[in-house]
Amino acid sequence: MMQLKAGVALSLSKEYKQTEIGVIPSDWDVIELESLTTKIGSGITPTGGSSVYKEDGRPFVRSQNVGWGNLLLDDIAYIDDETHQTFPNTELKLNDVFLNISGASIGRSSYANSKLVGGNVNQHVCIIRPIENKLNPVYLNLFLISKNGQKQIDSFQSGGNRQGLNIGQIRTFQIPVPKTIVEQTLIATALSDADALISSLEKLIAKKRSIKQGAMQKLLQPKEGDGLSLSKGWEVKKLGDVGIIVTGSTPPTQIKEYWNGSIPWITPTDILNTQKDIFNSEREITNLGLQVIRKLPADTLLVTCIASIGKNAILRNDGACNQQINAIIPSSKTNVEFLYFLIENSKPYLIGKAGITATMMISKKEFSEITYSFPAFEEQTRIATILSDMDAEITALETKLAKYKKVKLGMMQNLLMGKIRLV
């Protein structure tokens, strides 16, 4: 996989000028968007709304189809030619730039690919059609979602709440433009290459997660023997038989000496869906606070059992948890990581065990009675090691992805304002 590095084969410009949108190279201009386009206008929703959508026909782009620089076409709608003929002024051309102008997704931008040519947009999406050889559409799309582009969009919103943009406002957007279309294209290509690398990494992570999910389904279930008997070495056990079950509690909040210490006190908000190990918490208690509730040793499994059923993590330090969590202090014959993966793979099963009062919950007694199939300790350890290695690989890829995204943001800021030049 190619490496993403800002500044490779780039040279710094020495001459800059101050403009109303910031410092840019002296040979660049700041130009109103209206002067760089042949069309700026929003679409129309056909009479009848979604009732006129078809399974195929002319693609109909809505705000949910416009992402942050990319298209989201999984749920693209279609209209027939008869409906299309009622608003021909919004017919899409290749490389038309889309800008969401209302609703929660205001400011998201993308551009039309060949699949969307001949389609239309609704009233929540603005079509911006750059003048060929004057404004590169990919360059414009990238600028709109950049820090400086979003700053201009925000400047038209009242009270910091994004309400909407009108066509007149969009026409006045100030665009920093290199003198030549060649430099714009080089910038667009460099950032598009970065996007492609990020996208390929995201796909690889999704593939690795899918492989891990399949491995969990296979490894955490015993193979059937004759009839209904379990495969050799597996045994059905209650959770109460594989460890000590503890429901957490809260030190009195009015006693200051119990709080703001260094001992983790875990609540459901501290447990993230993609996090196996937990070392710290948002709120921490003192030794005095720990003395008035149940202490949990390191390597205790925490499982949320009220409202958000089934989130789980392994507490890696001595600590405590609140009353929305049932903790399992595993016995010497139970591998805590195997137990984690077992719970992680069975959230629907846990939810099905929850009773419903004012909210869904699993009491300590009910939790203790829930059954799973367990192999011998050595097999638990082997399975846990395989799945933990998969987790480690995914985590490493996610760390690399976060790094690449950060580098790309820096590249956008530097390239789109000319701090780094490609010519």
Image (cartoon, rainbow, N blue to C red):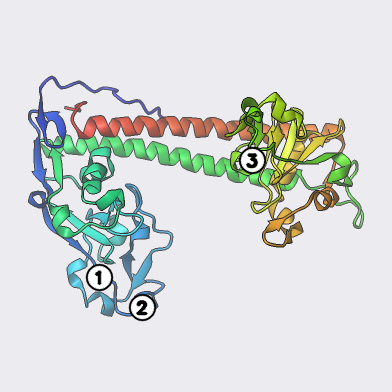
Mark in the foreground, 3 or 1: 3
Residue 63 visible in rendering = yes
Q: Secondary structure at mark 2?
A: helix
Q: Quadrant of the N terminus?
A: top left
Category of crowding for the residue at label 3, using alpha-carbon neighbours closer than 10 angstroms: few (below 14), some (14–19), many (at least 20): many
Label whose residue precedes the other's in the sequence (2 or 1): 1
Residue toward you, 219 or 418: 418
Label of residue 52 in the image: 2
Q: Are marks 3 and 2 in contact (CB under 8 Å)?
A: no
Task: Tell me: residue 89, above or below residue 231.
Answer: below
Residue toward you, 294 or 228: 294
> Spatial distance from mark 2 to mark 1, Cα to Cα?
13 Å
Q: Which residue is mark 1?
A: 44
Residue toward you, 335 or 312: 312
Q: Amino acid at mark 1?
A: Ile
Task: Tell me: residue 389, above or below residue 302.
Answer: above
Q: Amino acid at mark 2?
A: Val
> Spatial distance from mark 3 to mark 2, Cα to Cα?
48 Å
Mark in the foreground, 3 or 2: 3
Q: Residue at x 87, y 36 (%)?
A: 376
Apparent side of residue 346 relative to residue 365 in the rendered image (left or right): left
Label of residue 267 in the image: 3
Name the spot of residue 232 as percent of width and height, x first. 90, 43
Apparent side of residue 380 relative to residue 118 in the rendered image (left or right): right
Name the spot of residue 30 as percent of width and height, x first. 10, 39
Category of crowding for the residue at label 2, using alpha-carbon neighbours closer than 10 angstroms: few (below 14), some (14–19), many (at least 20): few
Label whose residue precedes the other's in the sequence (3 or 1): 1
Q: Are marks 3 and 1 in contact (CB under 8 Å)?
A: no
Apparent side of residue 12 relative to residue 83 in the rendered image (left or right): left
Name the spot of residue 313 as percent of width and height, x first. 67, 38
Q: Residue at x 31, y 30 (%)?
A: 410
Label of residue 105 in the image: none
